[in-house]
């Protein structure tokens, strides 16, 4: 069974492979990272790990039984107990409930380990799968936005009820 792990430097080769293998798949529903992101991957990873160490962000990878990365769940812009949630699942692992499971796990983790009280998220209107994950994991629709020029929806999940909880909805 895949496991959620906090991002570490030794995830670099598997993470880069994951991003390269799924680039076109991701670009269909979220803004593409661009060629520079891949060219400067090592430097970017060091910067992400520094942000994580500073507590500004928390990055996670969903590691398969073979050691490959099947997904990412990121918490960025942590401020005053709230962070923005982002996630992506490999094309080969899509439709298996991994995103829902990983988001639920992160919701429980952030209250125990990071002291967060709420998460925000956004999804494009045409990304029904991502919107379904958010709804299934207790996020509520809060408004509209634009994501890379595309119509999107914003969501929020208050986590106060999870403190000390063994599992989430």
Image (cartoon, helix red, strand yellow):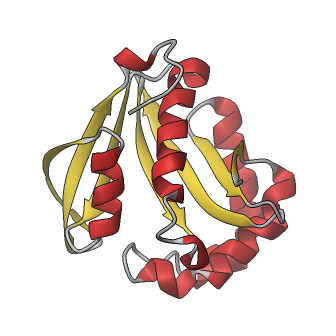
Of residue 154 and residue 139, the one placed in the foreground of this image is 139
Judged left or right of residue 69, residue 129 is: left
**110 and 91: which one is in front?**
91
Q: Where is residue 145 in the image (x, y as percent from the top left)?
A: 17, 58
Point out the residue furthest to the bottom here. Answer: 24
Is there any visible trace of residue 5 in the rendered image?
yes
Q: Looking at the picture, does residue 126 appear above or below residue 7?
A: below
Say above or below: 86 vs 91: above
Q: Where is residue 136 in the image (x, y as percent from the top left)?
A: 32, 47
- For the N terminus, the quadrant is bottom right
Residue 77, image x and y in percent?
45, 40
Measured as percent of width and height from the top left, residue 92 is found at: 60, 78
| Residue farthest toward the left in the current orientation of the protein | 143
Q: In the image, is 64 to the left or to the right of 108?
A: right
Front one among 40 and 64:
64
Question: Where 57 sits versus 96, above or below?
Answer: above
């Amino acid at each position: 069974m895949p496991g959620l792990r906090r991002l570490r430097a030794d995830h670099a080769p598997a993470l880069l492979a994951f991003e390269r293998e799924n680039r076109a798949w991701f670009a269909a529903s979220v803004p593409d990272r661009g060629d520079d992101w891949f060219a400067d991957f090592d430097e970017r990873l060091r910067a992400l790990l520094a942000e994580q160490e500073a507590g500004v962000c928390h990055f996670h990878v969903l590691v398969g039984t073979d050691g490959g990365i099947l997904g990412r769940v990121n918490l960025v812009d942590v401020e005053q107990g709230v962070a923005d949630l982002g996630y992506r699942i490999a094309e080969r692992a899509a439709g298996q409930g991994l995103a829902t499971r990983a988001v639920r796990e992160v919701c429980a983790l952030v209250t125990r380990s990071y002291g967060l009280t709420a998460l925000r998220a956004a999804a494009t209107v045409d990304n029904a799968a991502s919107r379904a994950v958010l709804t299934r994991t207790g996020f509520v629709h809060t408004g509209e936005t634009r994501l890379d020029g595309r119509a999107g929806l914003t969501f929020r999940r208050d986590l106060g009820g999870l403190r000390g909880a063994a599992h989430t909805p």
